[in-house]
Image (tube, rainbow, N blue to C red):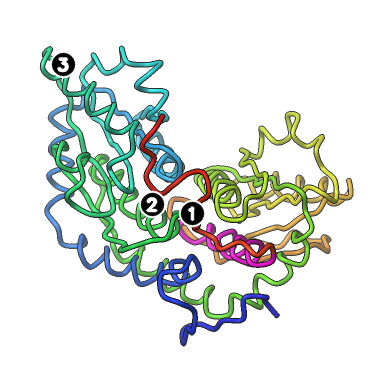
Amino acid sequence: MSNLDKTHPENTYPKNTYLDNILEQPDVLRSITQLYQDSDVWEAIHQAWSSRSQYRLVLTGLGASFNALYPARYYLHQQGLPALHIDTGELIHYLPELLQQPLFLVVVSQSGESIEIQRLLEQIAQQRSAGSPHWLVSITNQSGNRLAQASDLALYTQAGREVGVATKTYTSTLAVLHWLARAIAGQPLHAQEILQVADHCDLFLADWQVTIQPAFSAAKDAASFALVARGPSIASACNGALGLQEAARCPASGYVGSQFRHGPMEMISPALATLLWTLPDQTFDLSARMAKDIGDRGGCLVTMGAAVPGLDNAHISLPRLSSWLSPILDILPVQLLIAELAEAQGIIPGQFRWSGKVIHQE
């Protein structure tokens, strides 16, 4: 039984805990679907892009907001719309010349107030006054922030109050970014898909203690974590690692599957817990082979997705979804594992020691 002895949906935990935020995610997805499914904002975005298709398309954010951009970036590229995916801090300090070009900017920030975002807005204002055209669409959690106010078009996840570590703001951002990417590409919204994902999330969360227990038992004594994925779910590997660092204070890194083979596999040992997404997509065979190699080398392994035949390791089964939408669901096992690991260490997830929900200093 989980060491977090709580139930769902009749929850007895305090409101607005980290776990509370995790369990709210299906309802948040339904809420933003209701908000945006009939909105004319998507046509406005498509028209804005159509009239600026010669602009460079730039996707930027920090932390969880940066990670959430991976699926949208992949989707846009597959639609023949190359997009630059750049950390905001690197953009303002090492690529400021890029801001001198005509840009269609997608800027993601939960608060809209982080220091790098403010520096970016200052540089954009300077370039606009010098005659460089930009069109800025932002995604933040709620209105009234400086990023939203400076945007040509502002989108909101309206996920509500959240403890320090991004959970529901992250998954709701994934949903809005998917719609945004579809709008830029001139594709229909398909809001029903997000509702189906929300239903799958509900099913996964309904018995989460039992589902997570094998992974917790396998990983609870690990000294560090490697999270490995391919395709759009790279977002989950990177954001899962970020969550482990923030909420459970564990050394953790997110890896693209191919990159993990090029060196990091040397770290495989019982002390390294490798969380490997084995999603049933075009790279399943590659992920299955990696899972077998990790097992053969005595590594601590947790697979998430489709079970790998012939392996006897901790496994969390996930339903097959569109690759573009799967990251909304396949981050849930890691979020819940983080809650378990933090509880085992006496850590209250979301209580920052050295950082904070909004970063005010570079």
Say what amino acid the circle numbered 3 marks. Ser
Among the two numbered marks 1 and 2 on one chain, the one whose residue lies closer to the N terminus = 2
Relative height, residue 135 to residue 220 (above, below): above
Q: Secondary structure at mark 3?
A: loop
Span colored in magenta: 327-344
Res 45 quadrant in image: top left
Q: How busy is the neighbourhood of tag 2: few (under 14 within 10 Å), some, or many (20 plus)?
A: many
Rendered image quadrant of residue 120: top left
Point out the image quarter for the N terminus: bottom right
What residue sits 54% from the left and 59% below the top? 330
Work out which residue is located at the far bottom of the displayed protein and give it. 10
Question: How many residues crowd around disc 1 within 10 Å: few (fewer than 14), some, or many (20 or more)?
Answer: many
Q: CA distance from mark 2 to mark 3?
A: 30 Å
Taking the magenta stretch, the answer to whether it contains residue 334 is: yes
Q: Give the crowd class for mark 3: few <14, some 14-19, many >=20 residues within 10 Å.
A: some
127 with respect to 207 (left or right): left
Between 190 and 258, the one lying in front of the other is 258
Counting residues from the start of the chain, the first of labels 2 and 3 encountered is 3
In this rendering, would 97 be left or right of 320? left
Q: Residue drawn at (16%, 37%), measured in percent from left and top?
A: 151
Quadrant (top left, top right, bottom left, bottom right) of the C terminus: top left
Q: Is residue 205 magenta?
A: no
Which mark is drawn over residue 327? Answer: 1
| Residue 160 higher or lower than 250, as above or below | below
- Amino acid bearing label 2: Leu
Q: What amino acid type is highlighted by mark number 1? A: Pro
Which disc is residue 132 wearing? Answer: 3
Describe the element under mark 2 as helix, strand or loop: helix
In space, the residues marked 1 and 2 are separated at their CA atoms by 8 Å
Marking on residue 174: 2
